[in-house]
Structures are given as C-alpha cells and as structure tokens.
Image (cartoon, grey):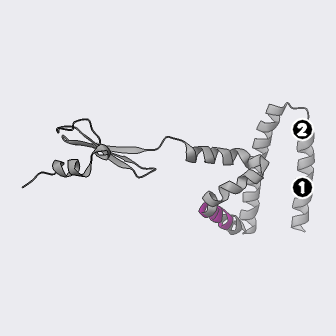
C-alpha cells in the first residue's frame, strides 16, 4: 500500500514539474533538471534509509566503483552518458604523463611514470650532455670507475 502511495505521489510531482518547466528556456531547463535530479536522489536515499533497504544502494555503488574502469567503454552506447566516456578517454590518452627527475653532480635521471622509460643525462664527464640511451655498451662500461 505504501508503495502505491509513493508511486502516485511521484506521478503527481512529475506532472507538476513538467508543467512548471515548460515555459523555461533550454539552459534553464538543464539547471532545473539538475536540481530536480539531485532532489530525487536525496528523496530516494531517504526512502531507502527509512525502509531499511539502503544496503542495496551501497552494494550497487561498491560494485560500480570496483568495475568503473571496465564499464567506461560501454558508456558510448548511452547517448546521455557519452560526455563521460569522452572525458575519460581524453584523460587516458592525454600527453601529460608525469615524470620524476633526480639529479646528482654526475648524472640527471628521468623516469616517465606512464611508459616506464628511464633515461639519464651525463653532466660532468667527457660525454657531457649525452643521454645514456645514446651511448654504446663500451661507452657505458667506460663510465664505470675501475678499481
């Protein structure tokens, strides 16, 4: 019985909301729609909390968090979520990879976190300014101090 009352209330509120939104411009409709969505989400949270069924939403949320990266490619099949997919794809393919650098008096080493490439620039040797990746094996061995 309670479910029927809630369903009727949602239908009445939806009907009133549609009548309220009709005279608005497109930009205003988006803002009002976003606010209505947030209010609906809060109302659903309250309803689930009151009825003791919030654990269902918690389980679904946990599952989505665990599989979110695998689910992003499927977002392209939902036009209203296409923007999320494109943002995630752009973020992954952006050329702004992080690099770490450490410098000593003899060598400046750089690590590219995304690709895992490591290279070093010689600073105070006969090959000053050259990178380790440019040197041959015999040149690399000659850098090692002999004892």
Q: Is residue 3 left or right of residue 42?
A: right
Q: Position of residue 17 (x, y in %)?
A: 88, 43
User: Which residue is located at x 89 percent, y 55 percent?
Assistant: 9
Q: Where is residue 5, by image quadrant? A: bottom right
When the figure is inspected, residue 63 is found, relative to residue 132, above or below; the finding is below
User: Which residue is located at x 27 percent, y 38 percent?
Assistant: 130
User: Which residue is located at x 74 percent, y 48 percent?
Assistant: 81
When the figure is inspected, residue 20 is found, relative to residue 142, above or below; the finding is above
Pointer 2: what residue? 20
Residue situated furthest top in the rendering: 25
32 or 2: nearer the eye?
32
Looking at the rendered image, the quarter that the C terminus falls into is bottom left
Secondary structure under badge 2? helix
Q: Position of residue 127 (x, y in %)?
A: 21, 38
Looking at the rendered image, the quarter that the N terminus falls into is bottom right
69 or 128: nearer the eye?
128
Tag on residue 82?
none
16 or 56: nearer the eye?
56
C-alpha distance separating marks 1 and 2: 16 Å
Q: Is residue 62 left or right of residue 76?
A: left
Residue situated furthest left in the rendering: 147
Sequence order check, earlier mark of 1 and 2: 1
Q: Is residue 28 magenta?
A: no
**Majority SS type along the magenta span:** helix
Magenta residues (range): 59-66
Q: Position of residue 98 (x, y in %)?
A: 43, 44
Q: Position of residue 49 (x, y in %)?
A: 71, 63
Pointer 1: what residue? 9
* Label 1 crowd (10 A; few <14 / some 14-19 / many >=20): few
Q: Is residue 63 magenta?
A: yes
Q: Where is residue 62, by image quadrant? A: bottom right
């Amino acid at each position: 019985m309670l479910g029927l009352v809630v369903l009727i209330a949602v239908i009445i509120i939806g009907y009133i909301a549609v009548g309220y939104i009709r005279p608005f411009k497109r930009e205003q409709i988006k803002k009002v729609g976003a606010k209505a969505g947030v209010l609906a989400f809060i109302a659903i949270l309250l309803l689930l909390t009151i009825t003791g069924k919030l654990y269902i939403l918690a389980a679904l949320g946990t599952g989505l968090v665990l599989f979110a990266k695998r689910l992003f490619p499927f977002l392209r099949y939902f036009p209203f979520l296409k923007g999320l997919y494109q943002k995630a794809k752009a973020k992954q393919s952006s050329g702004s990879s992080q690099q770490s650098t450490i410098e000593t008096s003899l060598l400046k080493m750089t690590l590219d976190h995304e690709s895992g490439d490591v290279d070093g620039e010689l600073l105070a040797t006969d090959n000053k300014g050259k990178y380790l990746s440019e040197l041959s094996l015999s040149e690399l061995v000659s850098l090692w101090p002999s004892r």
